[in-house]
Amino acid sequence: MSYVHPEYLVETAWVAEHSNDANIRIIESDEDPLLYAIGHVPGAVQVDWFSTLQHPLRRDFLTKEKFEEVNSSLGIGNDTTVVFYGDKSNWFACYALWLFQYYGHKNVKIMNGGRLKWEKENRPLVKEVVSYPQASYKAKEADKSIRAFRDEVLKQSNAKKPLVDVRSPKEYSGELISMPAYPQEGATRGGHIPGAASIPWAQAVNEADSTFKTADELRALYEGKNIKADSEVIAYCRIGERSSLTWFVLKYLLGYPNVKNYDGSWTEWGNLVDAPIEKS
Amino acid sequence: MPLPPKLQEIVDDFASMAREEKLETLIAYAESFPTLPDWLKEKRDSMEAVPECMTPVFLFGEKQPNGGIHFYLDIPPQSPTVRGLASLLANGLDGCTPEEILTVPGDFYLPMNLQEAVSQQRINGFTGVLAHMKHEAVRLMQNK
């Protein structure tokens, strides 16, 4: 079996060949915001999940108008194909792709393997920041069908419908409230949403080069935990970045039609008064 | 208790910088990151393996003849922000005595107004690195 929507994935060699095409824009989106400045794929522009993609005041994403502004300034038009890549096995590349989808940009792809694979293949990284002619981007209304909010997550949990907790095993069990060795902050309670299956995000990628596992491996992984294509699935992590990767895998590589990312994730749920929690 | 003078100077500099300048300065710190001397590489290799998603930070304090501490750092180039922050701190505390290092408050960086440039989680890295440095200071006070 191959991926259900292979058109959402490109390889590093494809990017090397097409990065200068006029209708293609390569975007680097990293956990570490300084990586782009140190060296990036020639011609790539940067979006930072924090300073670019978040709302400056409340806990939410940038507004539709601001999203239009960002895209226009990066020379991205409504017909531009946008290819994302980044560090940490493409966590924040998937997060940015998910957000582009949220505002209706359909023509998006992930560079398989991200920065790690590009570096391992000794492909060029440059410091030169290219600017592109201003475009005039029009975003669509936010697509709530790919984003889950807390009330819906509670209903999902009460109805015993599939929830995927993609955090590390110790975060799932409640022993830790952040990733191992990251600062322990952000939630006042540890554990997981009742009924959630523990499928750490990293199981979907090959450790050696950050590429996605094969369709057969992925199917076995999720179906083995009873996360199946015919159900509505909600994925979450701590702030919604690692679960964006899982969302991408389920939605495009395995072709599940109804998958949502709960970006409130544990930093919301673990602070929410009266929210049910399971510990194990 | 005032901060060690060099660290105070860095904090003041950052406080007056615009966002872009802060980022450029952090990049400069990250790029001027010294390589670990050979005599420390062995210690480095004997360190525990690091779990999946964290930035491995190796830090070693060495007592100088005048009693001040010099910190050696090893952080992968894939984490320039952590490199930049750690290197800034190592510069600010270079030559300080263990006692001086132990007096640095965990929130010393607040006036630097870094949150406009880097996410809170990265800034928290400061606290982690400073805590590591304090452990080293305690170790050196006990002459271990």
Image: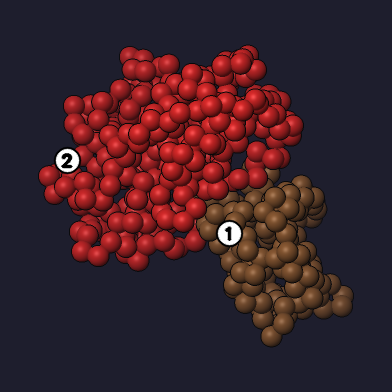
Q: Position of residue A54 (x, y in %)?
A: 48, 47
Q: Nearer the viewer, residue B111 or A58?
A: A58
Q: Position of residue A273 (x, y in %)?
A: 25, 65
Which quarter of the figure is the C terminus of chain A placed in? bottom left
Scheme of image coloration: by chain
- Chain B drawing hue: brown
Subunit of label 2: A
Q: Nearer the viewer, residue A269 or A212?
A: A269
| Residue at 44% across, 53% down | A179
Q: Which quadrant holds residue A101?
A: top left
- Identify the residue at the far bottom of this view: B1
In the picture, which chain is red? Answer: A
> Considering the numbered disc 2 on the image, is that residue within a helix, a strand or a loop?
loop
Q: Which quadrant holds residue A33?
A: top right
| Residue at 21% across, 39% down | A162
- Identify the residue at the far right of this view: B65
Structural crowding at the residue carrying mark 2, measured as other residues with C-alpha within 10 Å and reported as few (<14), some (14–19) or many (≥20): some
Task: Mark yes or no: residue A218 visible.
Answer: no
> Considering the numbered disc 1 on the image, is that residue within a helix, a strand or a loop?
helix
Mark 2 lies on residue: A161
User: In the visual, does A131 lie left or right of A60?
Assistant: right
Q: Quick check: B105 above or below A164?
A: below
Mark 1 lies on residue: B115
